[in-house]
Image (cartoon, rainbow, N blue to C red):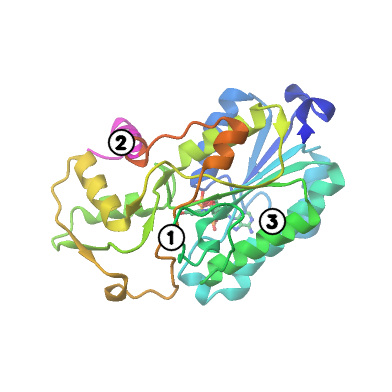
Amino acid sequence: MWQLGSGTKLSDMKILVTGANGQLGNELHIQLDKEFPGSAIYTDIEELDLTDPKAVEAYIVNNDITHIINCAAYNAVDQAEEEKMLSARINNDAVKNLAIAADANGAKIIHISTDYVFDGTNYRPYRESDKVNPISQYGTTKRKGETSLLALSPEAIIIRTAWLYSSFGHNFLKVMLEKANTQQDLKVVCDQIGTPTYARDLAAAIVKVIQSHQWVPGIYHFTNEGAASWYDFAKAIFRIAGINKKVIPIPTEDYPTAAKRPSYSILDRSRIKATYGVEIPHWEESLSDCIKLMKQNGMLH
Ligand SMILES: NC(=O)c1ccc[n+]([C@@H]2O[C@H](COP(=O)([O-])OP(=O)(O)OC[C@H]3O[C@@H](n4cnc5c(N)ncnc54)[C@H](OP(=O)(O)O)[C@@H]3O)[C@@H](O)[C@H]2O)c1
């Protein structure tokens, strides 16, 4: 176990958040600025393209970065089937670049991965030690990112999450709300089971890991509590938002997509709860919080 106190005091931390314009990056920005004022810097592709190894190393060394939270990713699951090279560059090569640069400055890495490293054939929530078997290009590149990172940086922490949404960025919640005003009934897949996860809650868990004064490397699973199909998620969005919209459940075979998705990808969250004392809200409670915030911010009426 690596003790934060052995090398870095909380006040000496310099945290780099990559992919900062995304859902998780924005949520982290709010929480890190509150918990560790002045300690974090935020970059996205315009400031630092992670696929450029020299730029990444120079940035981390010149800014004397002590911690990296990598929220950058190629996340377009269907498009990845076409953009094989680009998805691999961002989800694997860029992670290697970060690992090498981190090593040059003795920095610690928290990297985010996905439930799509699994094939969905399990009969109980996936544990970190369960066999991976990605069934899409996105899942394959994210798994390669994990193995590259663990090979180059065995001290890294990897947090796998799933079905992220937030008031920031692009996600299923926003797509459903956009479709609320369309005439047709909404057909939504009912036989893929996962856990909708508020990026704000994942950001809070990451802050808790950093605040904990201890660093226990390896893979962790984090989602909100509970389980749902995309159909359940859509129904809950309209119910909580107070929108009268008919949602019709359909099987995956009636909604063909370029990428295959696991039919079951519930993650077992025991390890992060036991190691870091993370308390996790149920997904419906967090969805209510997010929709309430969107209403307060005038994003939804
Ligand atoms: N979204 C989900 O449902 C989901 C599910 C499971 C796991 N995850 C994982 O959770 C993490 C956070 O996801 P998120 O939803 O917050 O992602 P996001 O909203 O898509 O944000 C990712 C950010 O990374 C940026 N980026 C792309 N290529 C880059 C590069 N070469 N250099 C620097 N930045 C680059 C993106 O910029 P552009 O927008 O310009 O490309 C974007 O701003 C990712 O690791 C993702 O794989 C997400």
In the displayed structure image, the side of residue 253 where residue 194 appears, left or right: right
- SS under mark 3: loop
Q: Is residue 247 magenta?
A: no
The residue identified by callout 2 is 288
Q: Quadrant of the C terminus?
A: top left
- The residue under the point 69% across, 56% down is 50
Amino acid, disc 3: Leu
Circle 2 crowding by C-alpha within 10 Å: few under 14, some 14–19, many from 20:
some
For label 1, the residue is 123
Q: CA distance from mark 1 to mark 3?
A: 37 Å
Q: CA distance from mark 1 to mark 2?
A: 29 Å
Q: Looking at the image, is 57 positioned above or below residue 122?
A: above
Left or right position of 179 against 89: left
- Residue drawn at (58%, 34%), measured in percent from left and top? 274
In this view of the protein, can residue 229 be seen by the observer? yes
Q: Which residues are magenta?
A: 287-301
Give the residue at x 54% y 56%: 114
Where is residue 90? Give x, y as percent: 63, 62
Mark whose residue sits in front, 3 or 2: 2
Give residue 85's quadrant in the image. Answer: bottom right
Is there CB contact under 8 Å for labels 1 and 3? no
Tell me the chief SS of the magenta region: helix
Q: Give the amino acid at mark 2.
A: Ser
Residue to which mark 3 is pinned: 50
Q: Tell me where residue 171 appears, x and y as whole percent.
A: 39, 53
Q: Secondary structure at mark 2?
A: helix
Near-viewer residue (278 or 99): 278
